[in-house]
């Protein structure tokens, strides 16, 4: 066990040195990835305006006019929320608006009780919680020349815990979809272990990096929407999955940036 611990610590030291030049860019990249699914969705609504209206009116029973207002409100909220999130301004409003979009679209399009959609969107909500936690921690550091704000500190602990738990739910949809090949079993085993470590906050940052690497490869290999020309509808679904996975990767990168929080094994180890 001592040898394993030494190897683990040496590996972490090497990775820390290698990743140090990239650290200042991680928050911006993470926030951009997190909101990428909302930006793509807003662009898709504008490009497919007529077909979106037809679906809401013909299949979801939206009255004429209400469907127009619903789509316009969605586009405006997603673009405004994404801009605020990337620029780190009014993050609470950005998170609230984007969360409302996730919930309302789920009900409006009749997908809220679809297992894959539900679990993936819970993971996206986990990413939004990580964004909120980053904002709360930044506010705490800036209050009265470094004096902590108890309310922000307390909130950030719970928000980080909720964000960690929700983020890892993406792998539930991965486990229960598709054929269980040997390669898939290996990915599920490694990813599942990393998910458990993220959820309990043990080596959470390094586990999050492992999950980002797995999701990057998975996204390029499985969600390669750019190679689908024969079926536009299928292409849109795969493209949607691609950008949702990017958003969840952004959530994991935010975890790398802010850490797992007080309710974690990593934090408890510091106290002993």
Image (cartoon, rainbow, N blue to C red):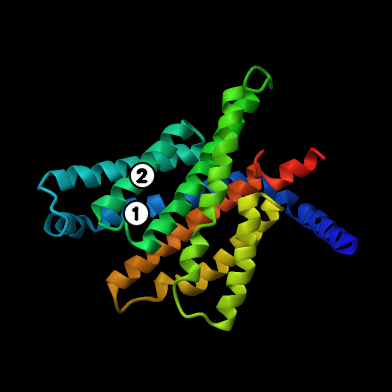
Q: Residues within 10 Å of mark 1 (few under 14, many from 20)?
A: many
Q: Position of residue 42 (x, y in %)?
A: 32, 50
Q: Residue at x 53, y 53 (%)?
A: 167
Q: Residue at x 22, y 44 (%)?
A: 70
Viewer-closest of 57 and 158: 158
CA gap between label 1 and label 2 equals 8 Å
Chain-order first, disc 1 or disc 2: 1
Q: In which quadrant will I find the C terminus?
A: top right
Disc 1 + disc 2, Cβ < 8 Å: yes
Q: Secondary structure at mark 1?
A: helix
Residue sticking out furthest to the left: 64
**Placement of 9 over or under 269, stated as above or below:** below
Residue sticking out furthest to the top: 144
**Placement of 254 over or under 6, stated as above or below:** above
Viewer-closest of 29 and 163: 163
Q: In this rendering, would 172 be left or right of 204?
A: left
Q: Position of residue 248 (x, y in %)?
A: 51, 55
From the image, tell me which residue sits under label 1. Answer: 41
Q: Residues within 10 Å of mark 2 (few under 14, many from 20)?
A: many
Q: Secondary structure at mark 2?
A: helix
Q: Residue at x 39, y 65 (%)?
A: 239
Q: Position of residue 95 (x, y in %)?
A: 44, 39
Q: In this rendering, would 4 be left or right of 220?
A: right
Q: In this rendering, would 168 be left or right of 141?
A: left
Q: Residue at x 72, y 42 (%)?
A: 267
Number of marks in picture: 2
From the image, tell me which residue sits under label 2. Answer: 78
State which quadrant residue 117 falls in. bottom left
State which quadrant residue 207 falls in. bottom right
Q: In which quadrant will I find the N terminus?
A: bottom right
């Amino acid at each position: 066990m001592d040898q394993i611990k030494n190897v683990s610590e040496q590996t972490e030291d090497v990775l820390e040195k290698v990743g140090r030049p990239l650290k200042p860019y991680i928050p911006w990249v993470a926030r951009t990835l997190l909101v990428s699914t909302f930006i793509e969705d807003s662009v898709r609504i504008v490009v497919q305006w007529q077909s979106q209206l037809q679906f809401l009116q013909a299949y979801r029973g939206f009255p004429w006019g209400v469907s127009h207002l619903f789509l316009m409100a969605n586009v405006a909220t997603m673009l405004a929320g994404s801009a605020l999130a990337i620029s780190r301004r009014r993050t609470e409003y950005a998170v609230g608006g984007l969360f409302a979009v996730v919930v309302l679209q789920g009900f409006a399009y009749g997908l809220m009780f679809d297992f894959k959609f539900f679990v993936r969107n819970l993971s996206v909500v986990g990413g939004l919680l990580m964004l909120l936690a980053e904002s709360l921690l930044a506010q705490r550091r800036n209050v009265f020349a470094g004096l902590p704000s108890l309310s922000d500190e307390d909130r950030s602990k719970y928000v980080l815990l909720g964000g960690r738990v929700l983020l890892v739910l993406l792998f539930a949809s991965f486990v229960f979809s598709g054929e269980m090949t040997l390669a898939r079993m290996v990915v599920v085993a490694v990813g599942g272990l990393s998910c458990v470590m993220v959820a309990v906050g043990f080596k959470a940052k390094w586990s999050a990096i492992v999950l980002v690497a797995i999701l990057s490869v998975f996204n390029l290999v499985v969600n390669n929407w750019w190679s689908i020309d024969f079926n536009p509808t299928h292409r849109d679904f795969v493209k949607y999955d691609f950008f949702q996975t990017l958003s969840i990767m952004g959530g994991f990168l935010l975890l790398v940036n802010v850490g797992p929080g007080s309710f974690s094994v990593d934090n408890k180890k510091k106290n002993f």
